[in-house]
Image (tube, grey):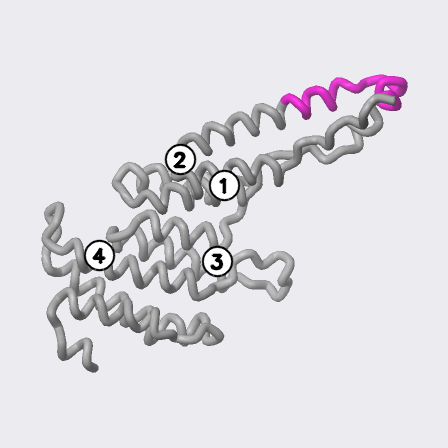
Amino acid sequence: SPPPPPPPIDTLDWNRVISALAIQHGQPQAAYELLQEFWTFTEDLQQRLSSLQYPQQKQRHQNFAAMTIPQPDLFSYNSILEGWARLKDTRAAVEANKIYTLIRRSENLQPNIVTYTSAIKANGGDLDRVNKIAQECLEAARQKDGEDDDYTVILDHAFFNAWLLACVQAAATTGQEGKDVIVTGDAIATAQDILLKIIPKNASHIPRTKTLYGSLLQCFLIQDDLEGATQ
């Protein structure tokens, strides 16, 4: 007897390769191109399914008609966003922001904490942009309606650590690209607010670890403010 047909390629299979390309191999552009192929694959299956018009066709293709058509999901886009975030250069930030904006504007996708964290990491020392993304995340977290299944933004340690590290990067870029000392001051003030006000108010369940305090200390030390660091 002939061997059984191979199992159909599903979303998980596509996502494994997209994630590997974007993150493990540092090729988010190639991962994005594969994502476009994934959409083409999905649309082709949808067209084939819609072409089953007659009862005998539907019976003959019963298994095909009953299967769930795979399509890109939030994990697909988050993988590419994280891939760009890890490259840490100007073009990477631009491309990451395109993916972030696409997710935010999509009718079928909703950002989760991974989306916001990767977007913050991608924007590094651009503290204005980072703070805007972080506030969008905090606002999304406040919209919890008591239904855990519908609640996709759960604040965690990684999010706040990324935000604090962005403050460190902003402090370290003082004087570069036309920026002046006010950038460092903003970085320190933001880092203090995150650690001493925002976490206790919005995420009291998250311990303020030595990692988080270390980022705040770095902001002071970059400015040679030993008194502030000691306090």
Q: Mark 4 or mark 2: which is in front?
A: 2
The amino acid beneath tag 3 is Ala
Cα distance in 3D space between marks 3 and 1: 25 Å
**Distance of label 1 from label 4 (alpha carbons):** 29 Å
In the image, what residue occupies the spot 46% across and 44% down?
A: 104
- Residue sitting at x 31%, y 73%: 213
Amino acid type for the residue under numbered disc 4: Ala
Say if the magenta span includes residue 158. no
| Residue at figure coordinates x 50%, y 41% from the top left | 19
Instruction: Determine the secondary structure under disc 1.
Output: helix
> Quick check: 67 above or below 61?
below
Task: Answer few, some or many: residues within 10 Å of disc 4's Cα (few below 14, many 20 plus, some between 14 and 19).
Answer: many
Please state the horizontal and vertical placement of residue 220, each as a whole percent of the image: 18, 70
Sequence-first disc among 2 and 1:
1
Q: Which of the two discs, 3 and 4, labels the residue nearer the N terminus?
A: 3
Question: In the rendered image, which residue does mark 1 sit on?
Answer: 19
Write down the quadrant of residue 38 in the picture: top right
Where is residue 106? Give x, y as percent.
51, 40
Q: How many labels, in total?
A: 4
The kind of residue on which mark 2 rests is Gln
- Residue at the location (51% across, 31% down)? 35
* Residue at the disc numbered 3: 140
105 lies left or right of 42:
left
**Residue wearing tag 2:** 27
Task: Tell me the chief SS of the magenta region.
Answer: helix
| Location of mark 4 (residue) | 170
**The residue stretch that appears in magenta:** 44-60
Determine the image quadrant of residue 222. bottom left
